[in-house]
Image (spheres, helix red, strand yellow):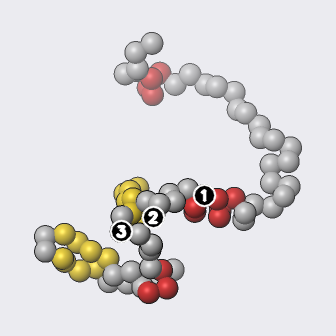
C-alpha cells in the first residue's frame, strides 16, 4: 500500500493518485465503506472482482460450503413487515 496526499480543490477534497496507479477514462465510481473509500473505474467496475477470483486455488470450496441452521432472531426482524 502506498501513501499519498489529500488536498483541497476549490471546495472539494481531492486525492493525488500516483502515476503508476493512474486510472483510465474521465469518470470513476466511489463508495465509502466504514473508514475505507473505494474508487473503481466506471468503464469496468467488476475488473477487481475478476482479478480476485484468480487468487483462489483450484480446490477452494471443492466440498461446497456448510449451511448453518437458520435461527430466528426477533430483535433483527422486529421492524420488518411480513
Q: Nearer the viewer, residue 4 or 9?
A: 9
Mark yes or no: residue 39 visible: yes
Q: Residues within 10 Å of mark 1 (few under 14, many from 20)?
A: few
Q: Are marks 1 and 3 in contact (CB under 8 Å)?
A: no
Q: Which residue is mark 3?
A: 26
Q: Earlier in the sequence, mark 1 or mark 3?
A: 3
Q: Residue at x 51, y 59 (%)?
A: 44
Horizontal and vertical percent position of residue 36: 41, 63
Q: Is residue 35 visible?
A: no
Image height check: is 78 above or below 46? above
Q: Earlier in the sequence, mark 1 or mark 2?
A: 2
Is 10 left, or right, of 19 in this rendering? Answer: left
Between residue 28 and residue 58, name the one nearer to us.
28
Q: Horizontally, is 61 left or right of 11 in the view? A: right
- In the picture of the structure, the residue carrying the numbered disc 1 is 49
Q: Quadrant of the C terminus?
A: top left
Q: Which quadrant of the figure has residue 12?
A: bottom left
Q: At which x and y percent is residue 53?
A: 69, 58
For image coordinates 84% across by 58% down, the residue present is 58
State which quadrant residue 69 falls in: top right
Number of the front mark, 1 or 2 = 2
Label 3 element class: loop
The numbered dot on residue 41 is 2
Contact flag, marks 1 and 2 (Cβ < 8 Å): no
Q: Residue at x 13, y 70 (%)?
A: 11
- Structural distance between the alpha carbons of marks 1 and 2: 13 Å
Return the residue found at the far bottom: 19
**Mark 3 or 2 closer to N-term?**
3
Of all residues, the one furthest to the left in this rendering is: 11
x, y (%) of residue 7?
23, 80
Q: CA distance from mark 3 to mark 2?
A: 9 Å
Amino acid at each position: 500500500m502506498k501513501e499519498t496526499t489529500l488536498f483541497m480543490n476549490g471546495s472539494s477534497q481531492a486525492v493525488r493518485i500516483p502515476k503508476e496507479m493512474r486510472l483510465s477514462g474521465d469518470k470513476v465510481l466511489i463508495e465509502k465503506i466504514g473508514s475505507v473509500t473505494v474508487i473503481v473505474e466506471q468503464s469496468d467496475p467488476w475488473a477487481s472482482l475478476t482479478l480476485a477470483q484468480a487468487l483462489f486455488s483450484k480446490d477452494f470450496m471443492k466440498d461446497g460450503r456448510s449451511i448453518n441452521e437458520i435461527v430466528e432472531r426477533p430483535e433483527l426482524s422486529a421492524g420488518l413487515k411480513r
